[in-house]
Every structure is written in structure tokens, then in C-alpha cells.
Amino acid sequence: MKDFYTMGIETSCDESSVSILKNDREILVNLISSQIDIHKIFGGVVPEIASRKHLEAINPLIEKALSESGIGYGDLDLIAVTKGPGLIGALLVGISAAKGLSLATGCDLIGVNHMQGHICANYLTHKDLKPPFITLVVSGGHSYLCKVNGYTDYEVIGSTRDDAAGESFDKIARSLGLGYPGGPKIDKLSNEGSSDAIDFPRVMLEKDSYDFSFSGLKTAVLNYLNNMKQKNETINKADVAASFQQALLDVLVKKSIRLIDETGLKQFALSGGVAANKKLRSMLKEELDKRDVKLFYPDNILCTDNAAMIAMAGYLNYKDGHKDDNYLKVYPNLDL
Ligand code: KG4
Ligand code: ZN
């Protein structure tokens, strides 16, 4: 049988990425051009700069992906591109490139939900993973607890009512002067601090709710820092980082485990940028091991934004009978 080649294109935030997937789960190339060095000067992503940088990066990345994978334009079967959620101008660069390429080569086009992409990153690392499973998708802009019933069947059980998990890491890191992106910095600094040094709130919401709310935790940390400054007391940054991280992870893990207990499913997949967090992985593993539930998470490079996960999700949706045409739009606020 002829091989099937999917090109993935991702430009929803601050990484321009192009990948080529062969058949089901084989990554031929996954090129990622990060803009972090520019955005960190401003302490966060500047949307207009992001769009301009994507525009500069995208065509050279497409050329490089093809030459490194050893296939030509004519070999492509499908172009999978992130259609949302994300920054509108940034998404438009990827969609426009994908449409042009699809028109020029005649191959099919499919728009992909970026959050589905994050979940599908697990299939690339774990060739044996099959639905059903529970997934916790925690990225810079979104947090979802969801049941994956089939390769294209997602049932959202809970989501954040305010700040996303990654966004909370970034905001607290910024207030501690640790720089952007904050997640990896807090992950590392926490090892030097005590996670029970400061008692920050764990907001669980209503008894049966699987939703999250992290804005109260953020306010509590900011108030603590302001109080300490007003009293001229020395702030132990490592203790603040570790105590904040513990409070946030306690909520994520407690709700995840309650859902596993309620559904009785035996597989749990972590995804999104925050899935790279070492403490989150170890806390989940400890609880899941007790229940004989297997924990999956993508390789680190596939946790944060990349086009291989977009190609994977696009391929699965395409095989399920979906595709788009050249009227494909961007959806900056797309839900899972
Ligand atoms: O999934 P992602 O690359 O982009 C979005 O779709 O938003 O996630 C980026 C987020 C950032 O907020 C970053 O601080 C967080 O993931 N992150 C982490 C870690 N690595 C990245 N958060 C906690 N611990 C980490 N090790
Ligand atoms: Zn993402």
C-alpha cells in the first residue's frame, strides 16, 4: 500500500512549527522555531510580533521539512493546520500557508483543534495507546479534564473558569522576577524550596465539580508577596515557587484521580505544556500506581507546541471522514 504523508503546520502562539508524519504515528521531521527569546524581553507573548515572526519563518520551515524528510511536494496527501484556539494573527499565517500549499499541490486540507493536538501528542510517544482514557490537558491558555472515548470523540468533563494552569505558572513566575515562560523556571526552583512553607488556597469549587479556578490562588500569592514587601521582609522565592506549585498541582491531581475513580478507566494521559512538569508527573504516578492505572505523557518536546501533534490529530480526523476546503477559517476561541 502507498505510504500516506501528512504535513502539520502550527502557528497558534509563539512557536512556528512544521512536521511530516508518515502513515499513522511515524514522525519523519518535526521542526520547531521558537520565538521565546524575543517575547521574553517583554515578559510574555506580544501578538503582533508573533504574527510577523511566523510570517518570516513559515515558508523556510516548509522547504526544510520537505528536504529533511526526503519527500517532494507531490508526495503530500494531507495538510493539517491549527485553526484555533490561539492568537488570531498568528493562526492566520499558518492557515494561509496551508491553503496556498493545498491549492498548489492539490492535496487535501484539514483544520485542527490545537487542544486535540496536545492530546494526540501522546499517540506519537506511545504507539500502543488506544482510547478510552482520561486526559488532563494543561497548557498556557487552557485546562481541561476530559474523557477520550475514541480517536475523534472527546467528552469535556471539566475546564477552567478563569486562569489556565500554565498561565498561572507564567504569572507567578513573572511576579517573582523569574522570566518567561514561567512553568519550567518554577518547576526547577521548587526543588530548592519547601512546598509546605506557605499555605496557599486549594480552590475545589462545588463538591461534584470537575472545573478548575486558579485566579484565587494567583491573588493569594500576589498578596503574600505584597505583604512581605510592605513589611520589608525577605522573600524566599524557592519557598513561594514550591508552595504555589504544590497548591495548584494538589487541585489538578485530586480532580484527575476522582475522575479515574468514578469512571474506572485504567489509562490516564497527561498533555499540554504543563505536562512537562516533573512534580505533576510524579504526583499523578504515585496515585495512579495505587489504582493500577497506567500513566502516559508525551516526550518533553511533544508536550509544548509542535506541528507533529497537529499532523497526528489531523490524520485521525481525516481518516474519520473529515476535511476542509479553502474557505477554512481561524477560530481564536475554539473549545475542545
Ligand atoms: O502547550 P503550550 O506549549 O502552549 C499553549 O498551548 O499554551 O504550553 C505552554 C505553557 C506555558 O504556560 C509554560 O509555562 C507551561 O506550559 N510549561 C510548564 C512547564 N513547561 C512548560 N509549566 C509547568 N512546568 C513545566 N515544566
Ligand atoms: Zn499549546
Image (spheres, rainbow, N blue to C red):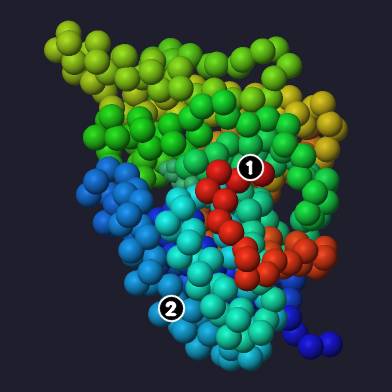
- Does residue 29 lie above or below 148 as drawn? below
Which residue is farthest top?
Answer: 231
Can residue 243 be seen? no
- Residue drawn at 43 percent across, 73 percent down: 58
Can residue 155 be seen? yes
Mark number, residue 335: 1
Task: Please give the residue where the numbered disc 2 appears in the rendered image.
Answer: 59
Report the amino acid beneath label 1.
Answer: Asp
In which quarter of the view is residue 294 placed? top right
In the picture, which quadrant includes the C terminus?
top right
**Horizontal arrangement in the rendering, residue 265 relative to residue 34 (left or right):** right
Q: Give x and y (percent) for residue 125.
A: 65, 61
- Residue drawn at 14 percent across, 12 percent down: 232
**Horizontal arrangement in the rendering, residue 219 relative to residue 1 (left or right):** left
Q: Is mark 1 within 8 Å of ligand 1?
A: no
Report the amino acid beneath label 2.
Answer: Asn
Q: CA distance from mark 1 to mark 2?
A: 28 Å
